[in-house]
């Protein structure tokens, strides 16, 4: 399952990024765990300099800005491709 984290204190920009991630997940008919990370100590683990941050499968893909829908779609499909290639390697 896809893991998506929104890093930020809960501001309007953070909410926009979360809504965008949810929209793309729905459009692609995917199952994903979407989590808001609002605690500073937890955000520090990802070493971002500005919020909002977007993390997909524990990889920071964007920080300090609101990405567009095409970017989020690309990042999510890329994460799925990486997962699929890792699965086939494990099955061999």
Image: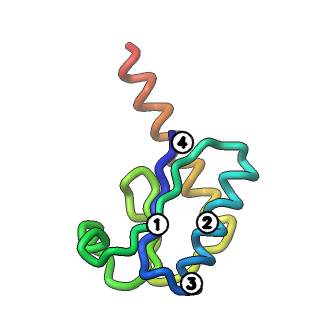
- Cα separation between marks 2 and 4: 14 Å
Q: Which residue is mark 2?
A: 71
- Which callout, 2 or 3, points at the residue further toward the start of the chain? 3
In the rendered image, residue 42, in percent from the top left (x then y), is placed at 28, 68
Estimate the spatial distance between the alpha carbons at disc 3 and disc 4, rounded to whole Å.
Answer: 25 Å
**Secondary structure category for the residue under label 3:** helix
Residue 88, quarter of the rendered image: top left
Instruction: Determine whether label 2 and label 4 are within 8 Å by CB.
Output: no
Q: Secondary structure at mark 2?
A: helix
Q: Which residue is mark 4?
A: 80
Crowding around mark 3 (Cα neighbors within 10 Å: few <14, some 14 to 19, many 20+) is: some
- Residue picked out by circle 3: 13
Q: Give the distance between the C-alpha atoms of the residues marked 1 and 3, in whole angstroms.
A: 13 Å
Q: Can you tell which of label 3 and label 4 is closer to the viewer?
A: 3
Asked if disc 2 and disc 3 are in contact, CB closer than 8 Å, the reply is no
Q: Position of residue 25 (x, y in %)?
A: 66, 52
In the depicted view, which residue is nearer to us: 83 or 16? 16
Residue 47, image quadrant: bottom left
Task: Tell me whether the residue at label 1 lies in contact with that at label 4, contact meaning CB atoms closer than 8 angstroms.
Answer: no
Give the alpha-carbon distance from disc 1 to disc 2, as whole Å: 19 Å
Q: Sequence-wise, which precedes: disc 1 or disc 4? A: 1
| Place of residue 11 in the rendered image (x, y in percent of width and height, measured from the top left) | 52, 86
Q: List the residue tagged with mark 1.
A: 36
């Amino acid at each position: 399952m896809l893991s998506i984290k929104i890093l930020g204190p809960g501001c309007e920009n953070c909410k926009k990024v979360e809504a965008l991630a949810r929209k793309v997940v729905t459009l692609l008919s995917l199952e994903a765990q979407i989590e808001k990370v609002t605690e500073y100590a937890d955000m520090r683990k990802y070493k971002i300099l500005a919020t909002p941050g977007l993390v997909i499968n524990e990889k920071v893909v964007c920080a300090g800005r609101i990405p567009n829908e095409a970017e989020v779609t690309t990042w999510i499909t890329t994460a799925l491709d990486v997962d699929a290639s890792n699965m086939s390697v494990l099955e061999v």
